[in-house]
Amino acid sequence: MRHKLLVIHGPNLNMLGKREPETYGTDTMEEINACLVSYGAQADIAVDTFQSNHEGDIVEKVQQAGKYDALIINPAAYTHTSIAIRDAVLLLDIPVIEIHLSNIYKRESFRHKSLLCDVVTGQIAGFGMHGYIMAIDAIKNMLGTGKEKQA
Ligand code: DQA
């Protein structure tokens, strides 16, 4: 495939489906991943996915993301706390989209602050799993699908 995309899911997102479905929806992380892999493939984008509940593992994965063309990251609760993930994102020279299933700005005040929002390309929040599709569309737009380049 023409492009490579990494999707990182932070802590507790492995529990999607069971976890507060009224806030996060009923799709499991596996279902979201399968959808992203097939949506990406239609645009010639190979999608790799990764989930961890551990900050250091996410930092290391972000450090390795330079070999991809773009990164989508839902840092989950680390959004609000992790200077280490922020610093790792600062190492990257590729488009990075921060994503949240819920609209963090409509929730508790401790969720209103993202430590990543000013170091990513853009943020999508509040559209549930469709937000990931929106993020892939944004990446397609930034990278080009290849078709228009051949035309
Ligand atoms: C979340 C929002 C965070 O505040 C929360 O800790 C999560 C999920 C979201 O996708 O809406 O775990 O990132």
Image: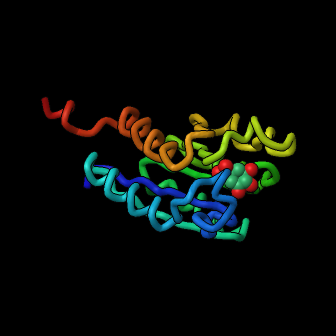
Q: Left or right: where does residue 81 sit relative to residue 116?
A: right
Q: Left or right: where does residue 41 sit relative to residue 15?
A: left
Residue beneath the point at 54% across and 62% down: 64
Say if 46 sits above or below 128 in the image.
below
Q: Quadrant of the C terminus?
A: top left
Q: Quadrant of the N terminus?
A: bottom left
Q: Identify the residue at the far left of this view.
A: 151
| Nearer to us in this view, 104 or 46 | 104
Where is residue 35 drawn, in percent x and y?
A: 39, 57
Name the image quarter holding residue 56: bottom right
Task: Look at the image and tell me whether residue 52 can be seen.
Answer: yes
Where is residue 136 drawn, in percent x and y?
A: 42, 43
Residue beneath the point at 14% across and 34% down: 150
Task: Look at the image and tell me whether residue 88 can be seen.
Answer: no
Display coloring = rainbow
In this figure, what is the number of numbered marks?
Answer: 0
Where is residue 120 drawn, in percent x and y?
A: 62, 39
| Nearer to us in this view, 48 or 61 | 48
Q: Left or right: where does residue 44 sit relative to residue 93?
A: left
Say if 79 sits above or below 105 in the image.
below
Q: Identify the residue at the far front of this view.
A: 22
Where is residue 86 drawn, in percent x and y?
A: 72, 49
Residue beneath the point at 86% across and 45% down: 110
| Nearer to us in this view, 29 or 96 | 29
